Image (tube, rainbow, N blue to C red):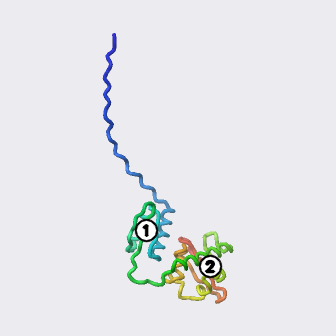
């Protein structure tokens, strides 16, 4: 006896909803990078950050009530701060570059501890093309002055001017999260 063949009917595939991309987990390194970008934004008029850190920086700006404009790009986001009045002496990019050269010179001379604390002296600043004025002036080593803003922009928000005598003055710089010894 012959078996009867069943007609096969194909069912139309149901459209499946695509899942939204899973949110990337925020790591300690992401928070640290966003914190540094936020600190730079507090000192400078603008900063460009990767898209992964943009929401963290925006949240920090909102928490600090810092008025910023957000300009989204393909893989970066630019935050521009609106400054209504001048709040101290802003460090210029050329000064920040020279100060970073002085820090690099100090590190090359071996004056960097395991914690990341760097000791910069007159010779480093002269090699960095800044001269002796930076260490001889007392007024500039505050957060709202040129010297302090340059240190913060280079990634050293903790600093202290040490002056045993005018010839041997030096600045001790510490990165974020590192306490300076007293």
Mark 1 residue crowding within 10 angstroms, few (<14) / some (14–19) / many (20+): some
Q: Count all numbered tags in the image, as a single digit.
A: 2
* Mark seen at residue 128: 2
Q: Quadrant of the C terminus?
A: bottom right
* First of labels 1, 2 by sequence position: 1
Residue 126 to residue 38: above or below:
below
Q: Position of residue 112 (x, y in %)?
A: 64, 72
Viewer-proximal residue among 152 and 51: 51
Q: Position of residue 159 (x, y in %)?
A: 56, 79
Viewer-proximal residue among 67 and 65: 67
Q: Quadrant of residue 75?
A: bottom left
Residue lying farthest right? 109
Q: Quadrant of residue 45?
A: bottom left
Mark 2 residue crowding within 10 angstroms, few (<14) / some (14–19) / many (20+): many
- In this figure, which residue is indicated by the disc labeled 1? 78
Residue 113 to residue 6: above or below:
below
Residue 37 to residue 127: above or below:
above
């Amino acid at each position: 006896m012959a078996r009867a063949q069943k007609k096969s009917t194909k069912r139309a595939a149901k459209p499946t909803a695509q899942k939204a991309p899973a949110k990337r987990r925020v790591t300690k390194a992401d928070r640290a990078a966003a914190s540094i970008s936020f600190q730079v934004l507090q000192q400078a008029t603008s900063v460009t950050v990767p898209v992964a850190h943009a929401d963290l920086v925006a949240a920090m700006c909102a928490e600090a009530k810092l008025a910023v404009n957000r300009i989204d790009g393909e893989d970066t986001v630019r935050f521009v701060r609106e400054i209504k009045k001048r709040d101290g002496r802003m460090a210029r990019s050329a000064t920040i570059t020279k100060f970073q050269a002085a820090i690099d010179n100090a590190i090359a001379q071996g004056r960097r501890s395991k914690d990341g604390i760097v000791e910069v002296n007159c010779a480093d600043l002269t090699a960095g093309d800044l001269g002796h004025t930076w260490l001889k002036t007392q007024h500039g080593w505050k957060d709202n002055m040129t010297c302090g803003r340059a240190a913060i922009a280079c990634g050293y928000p903790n600093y202290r001017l040490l002056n045993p005598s005018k010839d041997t003055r030096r600045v001790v710089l510490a990165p974020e999260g590192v306490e300076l010894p007293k």
